[in-house]
Image: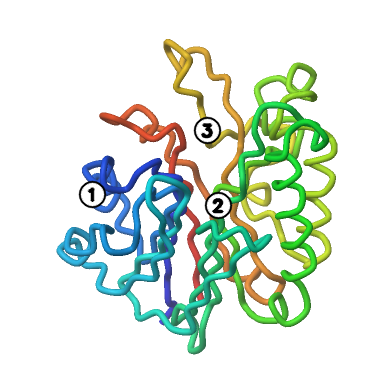
Amino acid sequence: MSERLKLVTWNINSVRLRMPIVEQLIEEVSPDVICLQETKCPDANFPENAFRKAGYEHMAINGQKGYHGVATVSKRPLSNVEKRDFCNVGDSRHVAVDVPFNGSAMRVHNFYVPAGGDEPNRDINPKFGHKLDFMTEMQSWLQGGETARPAVLVGDLNVAPYEHDVWSHKQLLKVVSHTPVETELFEKVRETGGWLDAMRQFTPLEEKLYTWWSYRAKDWSKADKGRRLDHVWVSEPLAPHIKGTSVLRDARGWEKPSDHAPVIAEFTS
């Protein structure tokens, strides 16, 4: 009998503030594993009881007060929890776990890559330099043994790499998240580790694909000035098992929404 696993990744922009729409997601999608970014709360304040009540008994949390934060919650047991401090600055931007799948384990990396500020110049904007350094460290680590096993890397990676990952390629070439220095490094991170861009396996490169729409737009859906900042990458051993990805665009219009929409990835044994 075929085994199925449904995983959701979502920058929730404060998990405590938006727990009602997390519960709505659970009711509508019923994922096995949920990877959240920008949880914005220390571990002690994470809404564990709400997740347990919804059937998610297993949690790996890496949070901090008011900023950043990632959490992976699961209906399946989690093991080998790892929290890596990229660039040695103490930010909570990564957690990895093993999830039982296909008679073995799937390694799940949950990332929140720095946004990088407004100016794409590391000489005058340290935040942009930090983002590039963060991705360089990802490149050096996420290869070899990390990708020789079934693994998936998800999260808000804060880069829209391709022309149709943004609403206007020409207008955003000098805007942080789509500048050539970022997109080229981003692709090096992915290609060095042999990761497959799973979302683009199911949505052709010539089609628009967004996961984020700014709060600044009066009517975000009508304007549709989106970017694909959230990603699902799979290692070569896991690639045969991913059966589909989709963006739950409607969630961007839910009550008190995040500016990101959830991305759903489905796997079969």
Q: Amino acid at mark 2?
A: Tyr
Alpha carbon separation for disc pair 2 and 3: 14 Å
**Residue, disc 1:** 23
On the picture, is 19 further left or further right than 118?
A: left
Name the residue at 82% across, 49% down.
185
Give the percent coordinates (x, y) of residue 258. 39, 35
For residue 112, which numbered disc appears in the image? Answer: 2
Q: Amino acid at mark 1?
A: Glu
Is tag 2's residue or tag 1's residue first in the polypeptide sequence? 1
Question: Which image quadrant is residue 207 in?
Answer: top right
Q: Give whichever of 57, 92 is nearer the camera.
A: 92
Instruction: Tell me: residue 228, above or below residue 155.
Output: above
Name the residue at 47% across, 78% down.
81
Give the label, 2 or 1, closer to the camera. Answer: 2
On the picture, is 4 further left or further right than 269?
A: left
Instruction: Tell me: residue 15, above or below residue 206.
Output: below
Question: Which image quadrant is residue 229 in?
Answer: top right
Tag 1, which secondary structure?
helix
Is tag 3's residue or tag 1's residue first in the polypeptide sequence? 1
Instruction: Tell me: residue 119, above or below residue 220.
Output: below
Question: Which image quadrant is residue 73 in?
Answer: bottom left
Tell which residue pokes out farthest to the bottom in this image: 103
Local packing at callout 2 (Cα closer than 10 Å; few below 14, some 14-19, many 20+) is many
For residue 180, which numbered disc appears in the image? Answer: none
Tag 2, which secondary structure?
strand
Tag 3, which secondary structure?
strand
Local packing at callout 3 (Cα closer than 10 Å; few below 14, some 14-19, many 20+) is many
Q: Give whichever of 67, 234 is nearer the camera.
A: 67
Name the residue at 47% across, 49% down.
68
**Residue, disc 3:** 212
Name the residue at 72% across, 80% down.
148
